[in-house]
Amino acid sequence: LRNGFPEVIFAQGKTPEQVVAIFAKLAEKNKNVLATRASQEMYEAVKQICPQAVYHPAARCITLRQKELPKRPGSILVISAGTADLPVAEEAAVTGEIMGNTVLRLYDVGVAGIHRLLDNHQLLSQASVIIVVAGMEGALASVVGGLVDKPVLAVPTSVGYGASFGGIAALLGMLNSCAAGVAVFNIDNGFGAAAMASSILRLKESSA
Amino acid sequence: LRNGFPEVIFAQGKTPEQVVAIFAKLAEKNKNVLATRASQEMYEAVKQICPQAVYHPAARCITLRQKELPKRPGSILVISAGTADLPVAEEAAVTGEIMGNTVLRLYDVGVAGIHRLLDNHQLLSQASVIIVVAGMEGALASVVGGLVDKPVLAVPTSVGYGASFGGIAALLGMLNSCAAGVAVFNIDNGFGAAAMASSILRLKESSA
Amino acid sequence: LRNGFPEVIFAQGKTPEQVVAIFAKLAEKNKNVLATRASQEMYEAVKQICPQAVYHPAARCITLRQKELPKRPGSILVISAGTADLPVAEEAAVTGEIMGNTVLRLYDVGVAGIHRLLDNHQLLSQASVIIVVAGMEGALASVVGGLVDKPVLAVPTSVGYGASFGGIAALLGMLNSCAAGVAVFNIDNGFGAAAMASSILRLKESSA
Amino acid sequence: LRNGFPEVIFAQGKTPEQVVAIFAKLAEKNKNVLATRASQEMYEAVKQICPQAVYHPAARCITLRQKELPKRPGSILVISAGTADLPVAEEAAVTGEIMGNTVLRLYDVGVAGIHRLLDNHQLLSQASVIIVVAGMEGALASVVGGLVDKPVLAVPTSVGYGASFGGIAALLGMLNSCAAGVAVFNIDNGFGAAAMASSILRLKESSA
Amino acid sequence: LRNGFPEVIFAQGKTPEQVVAIFAKLAEKNKNVLATRASQEMYEAVKQICPQAVYHPAARCITLRQKELPKRPGSILVISAGTADLPVAEEAAVTGEIMGNTVLRLYDVGVAGIHRLLDNHQLLSQASVIIVVAGMEGALASVVGGLVDKPVLAVPTSVGYGASFGGIAALLGMLNSCAAGVAVFNIDNGFGAAAMASSILRLKESSA
Amino acid sequence: LRNGFPEVIFAQGKTPEQVVAIFAKLAEKNKNVLATRASQEMYEAVKQICPQAVYHPAARCITLRQKELPKRPGSILVISAGTADLPVAEEAAVTGEIMGNTVLRLYDVGVAGIHRLLDNHQLLSQASVIIVVAGMEGALASVVGGLVDKPVLAVPTSVGYGASFGGIAALLGMLNSCAAGVAVFNIDNGFGAAAMASSILRLKESSA
Amino acid sequence: LRNGFPEVIFAQGKTPEQVVAIFAKLAEKNKNVLATRASQEMYEAVKQICPQAVYHPAARCITLRQKELPKRPGSILVISAGTADLPVAEEAAVTGEIMGNTVLRLYDVGVAGIHRLLDNHQLLSQASVIIVVAGMEGALASVVGGLVDKPVLAVPTSVGYGASFGGIAALLGMLNSCAAGVAVFNIDNGFGAAAMASSILRLKESSA
Amino acid sequence: LRNGFPEVIFAQGKTPEQVVAIFAKLAEKNKNVLATRASQEMYEAVKQICPQAVYHPAARCITLRQKELPKRPGSILVISAGTADLPVAEEAAVTGEIMGNTVLRLYDVGVAGIHRLLDNHQLLSQASVIIVVAGMEGALASVVGGLVDKPVLAVPTSVGYGASFGGIAALLGMLNSCAAGVAVFNIDNGFGAAAMASSILRLKESSA
Ligand SMILES: Nc1ncnc2c1ncn2[C@@H]1O[C@H](COP(=O)(O)O)[C@@H](O)[C@H]1O
Ligand SMILES: Nc1ncnc2c1ncn2[C@@H]1O[C@H](COP(=O)(O)O)[C@@H](O)[C@H]1O
Ligand SMILES: Nc1ncnc2c1ncn2[C@@H]1O[C@H](COP(=O)(O)O)[C@@H](O)[C@H]1O
Ligand SMILES: Nc1ncnc2c1ncn2[C@@H]1O[C@H](COP(=O)(O)O)[C@@H](O)[C@H]1O
Ligand SMILES: [Mg+2]
Ligand SMILES: [Mg+2]
Ligand SMILES: [Mg+2]
Ligand SMILES: [Mg+2]
Ligand SMILES: [Mg+2]
Ligand SMILES: [Mg+2]
Ligand SMILES: [Mg+2]
Ligand SMILES: [Mg+2]
């Protein structure tokens, strides 16, 4: 069970040595491995013992693909508001991919320039599930939630300053979205949203 | 489009007259209608102009079914922690049903008596999507999220006192869940979780 | 100086007797008078001593026009997100009018249905200053701020429940707006935004 | 449209390389460019590719003037409470200037020495719009708002310690100002206030 | 010892019967008695058993003077910002008087009309200790603190709405006052400030 | 009295020199000594003057055993949720031991994998008092509290990110535990919980 | 198992009918029953079906003793700071008694009159476990914790006003107690502290 | 006027160069100078241009005495709870001295060991004004306030961890003190308390 779900390491707060040790142990099981919040330095250490591991600098993730996954039907669209939201958006995208999903990206479509989002309406209709990553006031989740009729997973980011309070403004904005059908994740938790998106897409395959 | 999605009224803060007026207008479209946060008094007023409307006191909802919905595949399981969480759990359940879904219920399985939850393991595996409704510390979402490999939609409730701060403790608990794949909704927002669950089940029908 | 600026009473928390007493004293000066946050009961009391006073129930305001104001150039557009924001929007509109301005209204254009807003693009370009009134996540201010190139005055409302915390979510959303040129007022302070809008329009007349 | 509005970069959180890259791209359009929250180090990098760029150390801003702006009527007065508020006040002033406005400055007139402010009454009457920059308790905005009859744009700063909570005390003070006609911006957001002030002055030119 | 200090009852949250019972017991000691936060109804009950007791409706206080106090040198000036701050200002004033002090009052001198305060400069220089009572942003404490060179005791009030958060904005404003020599009390605690003012004046008599 | 209770130093925030000085003074009394929140560097300094002192790196504690303690009846079980909670769990365990108690450990039994906890049911029944150390949502305390009928001492940790707010989410979760008989300590305060556990076990010996 | 532990109902938020129904069902098991947060009205309803039930108005508790408990060794001392803390102190005391413990009481010994507490030093030494109930700043827990060498269970109460924030000030004070060996419970949770105290005393009987 | 009041510099956040420049300018006036929150490095720089300046490392203050002050009657007693509160206590003490007052010190008398405080009762009665400096739960202010009948000035410190929230717990504790006559200052604001104490002692000299 948990078919295709990779082994996951939350690297933040761990030493490179600790990350290597856990990575080595998980890699032995012949499963795919994902380390999130991993620095370049951690990756250099992991590469010593596991040369096939790949680093995704924008996502701050290390992945190891040892087992090929059959293509799952449907797709996840990751939308982000500003360039500073990129690390979280990419954490979601890379997580979605290592879990066997098709991932589409639409970045830098903040609501201050609403037309760039509307111009990509086709991408929105094409996707099965949408992950919206936004900091500051997090308004993008409400706008997207109003445009589509499918699951919208909202990830507030800690981007902003002053009264953004490290992501609280965006978090509250998303929890209070006036659009129905918007679910919320912890601040900067791109991984969690992608794990949920993946478990949603898995339903299309299942008989339950 | 938005096939089968009912017209929705958020009745809280509106007068019975206002609810009746909106209800009457929406009922004309020959669609199903749902009013959430509706009092008995509001229902009595609605019944005057729309005798087929039904009141669900535990859910504080009024529903009107004018259009039969083909049974959608899959099911939503609504789990609640304590008896005081019932209104929110029932708001979710009634919303799920009027949106055309099969809804299962498992109530009063708070983590202080973990075995009652574990004894119902079969229900957990049977469902496609699980809505967890809990107040106080909201720990139930983490436990359920750890037991299953499917979407868990967590709704914190305002149940509790003192340092529960009207649902903040449960909300924070759910946002910080140590289990992957848990999405969170606003405090007491059973409607939102069910709308999301429904849009997830719709994916099983769609080709996207 | 303060030409045309009415005498203002903040009636909330005062007894009808107190409101009448202050109203009577201000009316003597032969100036226009505005009482905000005034109940129907307060108005009935005021009407006894000042029959020309007018009550605006949606705005919860009492006005007395004793002195005609020359039409000021430019206009204020008041936009609101949901029906529950109406009292604050109307407080702004009525205040704007008694201060001698042309006021336009565009209500119920929440971002969950972004197209209703976009369809009214003409109204947006026509106005000199825009007041945006929104509760819940307050996203409307960012969207409008991105669409126009003129002063946007954002008023968060206490509309919402749970994690909206009586308007804090909307307030933070507006303070963190990703659109430049958005100024924020206290929760539910439609009066303050209109007073500012009016002082902005006055600049068009002045030589400073 | 957006005549004279410069291209703007929020440099904070970006690497010097990223700032240079964006700066280069924007400079090509032959428009004026403004980078806020920019370090000396960022400026050194920008100067390599764009020698006419100017650094304003007190404002932490880089500006590039490529296109002369016709003098706009009216003026912006920037007032600050203490010396520690200088960076935010200067961010506002430099932004106001690059947007084509006449900017006056009145610094170090905190309310603990109210007479220094009162002695400059003439400056207050002369300006069209006033930006008040203050940390700690932010009382200066209320005092200025009470003295003048024109738009007051209040910027709380993160100056202070202990219960100033990084600017929250000043922010709340300004939102609750007992003077009518005071609009508030995010903590330390001198740029936002100046953008608003500029859009207000633009109204004097426009026919709307 | 505690010469002249009255017996004190905090009546809020107590039943009229409880207040009467405590009042009766304290009155027996032949000392002066003060009950704060007392309703008219409580007073009616107290008057039954103690006809010399006096009610101060604006202060919500009951006092009983049984023992004359020699006039203490010096005076307390109570300043308030707005009419809604009156109950707290009067609680301070009545407390100051029953504790044997000369109390001066200067009400309704909010900073939005700074000149009314400045015009009363003589009162400020005359007093020994100044109690400043203000809600909303609480800026009055800083202005007064800057004008005088004597102890300023600041009492934030719960007057305001929205982001005043029941007095938090004023409390934070006062704690962060840019004027040296400002001490702060709990929200609405006029009694506490007057007790402190009285203990300060007592020092003038003492040899310590 | 306070028989067997060691002398305790809270080393955090002190310089190595200060720690050495206090350690030296306390060691003279021929009692056991415990320093919590001590770095390796502090230990190196202490070892110079007190070579029998022992460092516990995982617990960040220095201990000195000079006086043997008679084995106290009963035992303390320390349970932790995740690997990042280890420092706090070990602070509790080392404190428990130096205070003369038998300490059992059960680590890494977070509620996302509830079965690992249930498989250790025997350990739970064996212990007299249980200390539960958990960050993120802190749900482990509720689950353990529901499984056992003995004192559960809950220590929230600052482990987590985003809306965990440095341990607040776990703290609130534990304070609102739906299981009766759960007591809570300050964030990361493993020492405090062990001191309490020890004073509980002491009761078994006492006649009071 | 859970020998002697009564069946418990949290009555707050339930209707009298619901309380009666649950009470009736629990009373059938021939066990002792405790209902906390119960109003006089609820008791009148319960008495109809269960005449032996007793109401404790000060504690807001209903108890039913059907099964005599052997006297457990040791005792619980309940200490409270002010008269307004009485309901919570009595909730703890009544809970302790129905759980089979000897309960001592020491009320109205707030730290503002420290000598009243010190004069009762004998009571403090006599008890096995101490429950400290205090609102406002909650300082009593620290003082008691410093005086004794036994478990201190601290219950903050919602007593206070202004910046006491419904018990938060006392809660934080107790969590940060400078005395070791102080455990904290939710605001107003007298029941929880007594349940813990009882489980501590049970340890004296047990062999574990 | 402001006889004897030194010129004051708040050095925190300034560069050594800035401190030197301001210090030099103030020293010229032949008045006493005080710089608070000053580092050793700042002092070294100041000493270059002003060799008579003295550094008080525990207080983090630089003082320059150029003008002798006549001894003022009365005294200030500075009490602190723990060793970590020393910097704030010394800031208060050094400030009190440079302002011409007699300052007594009583350190390390936290309420967890209440007898050490009580043993110094004589010092308490001897002083005219008492400054209480305490972190963590700040209970010392209430205990001292209850013991004496003179002004108590309470300074919360940022000492503590976890739920002390950088001094908020102590601040709230002090604001909610159950002892009358306790005034509160900003977190770590030893200077402010001493300035107030000094202005209180000045009253003894004055005729007002
Ligand atoms: N219980 C609920 N909580 C949050 N949102 C709701 C709820 N019930 C309905 N809604 C939303 O409120 C909208 C209707 O609001 P209104 O127009 O004010 O009646 C619906 O379209 C839903 O998106
Ligand atoms: N709705 C409102 N919100 C905030 N301030 C208001 C409002 N209405 C009036 N005011 C202000 O309150 C002042 C009058 O307050 P008062 O003297 O208490 O009646 C006016 O001068 C306005 O500045
Ligand atoms: N308005 C007030 N705010 C705060 N504390 C007060 C107030 N009035 C009286 N007190 C305090 O409350 C004590 C009496 O409280 P109680 O015994 O509950 O009546 C007095 O000794 C005062 O210290
Ligand atoms: N990790 C800890 N957390 C909280 N309090 C502690 C801790 N370790 C020691 N203490 C307390 O700190 C006191 C010693 O503090 P100090 O005098 O600053 O070294 C001890 O008596 C304990 O009560
Ligand atoms: Mg949608
Ligand atoms: Mg799961
Ligand atoms: Mg704009
Ligand atoms: Mg003004
Ligand atoms: Mg002063
Ligand atoms: Mg238990
Ligand atoms: Mg103790
Ligand atoms: Mg006292």
Image (tube, coloured by chain):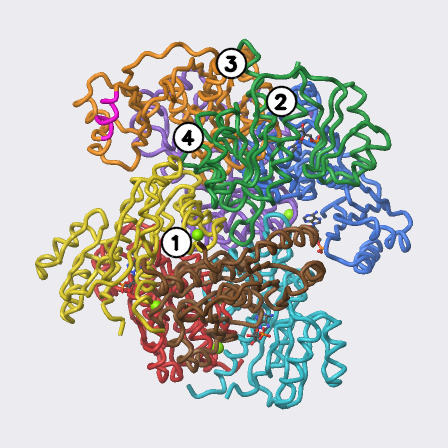
Chain colours: A orange, B green, C blue, D purple, E cyan, F yellow, G brown, H red
The stretch in magenta equals A22-29
- Residue at which label 4 appears: B180
| Disc 1 residue type (three-letter) | Val
Q: Secondary structure at mark 2?
A: loop
Q: Residue E74 appears at what percent x and percent y?
A: 56, 81
Q: Secondary structure at mark 4?
A: loop
Q: CA distance from mark 1 to mark 3?
A: 48 Å
Nearest the eye: A21 or F166: A21
Asked if labels 3 and 4 share a chain, the reply is: no
Nearest the eye: C23 or F35: F35
Q: Residue F146 appears at what percent x and percent y?
A: 44, 48
| Disc 2 residue type (three-letter) | Asn
- Residue at which label 3 appears: A127
Q: Secondary structure at mark 1?
A: strand
- Residue at which label 1 appears: F152
Residue C87 visible somewhere in the drawing: yes
Q: Is the residue marked 1 within 8 Å of ligand 10, measured from its CB?
A: yes
Residue D106 in the image: above or below residue A76: below
Q: Main secondary structure of the magenta part?
A: helix
Residue F101 in the image: above or below residue B183: below
- Residue at which label 2 appears: B101
Q: CA distance from mark 2 to mark 3?
A: 22 Å
Q: Residue at x 79, y 36 (%)?
A: B43
Q: Chain of mark 2?
A: B
Q: Is the residue marked 4 within 8 Å of ligand 6, measured from its CB?
A: yes
Q: Secondary structure at mark 3?
A: loop
Residue F19 in the image: above or below residue E56: above
Left or right: B77 in relation to E15 = left
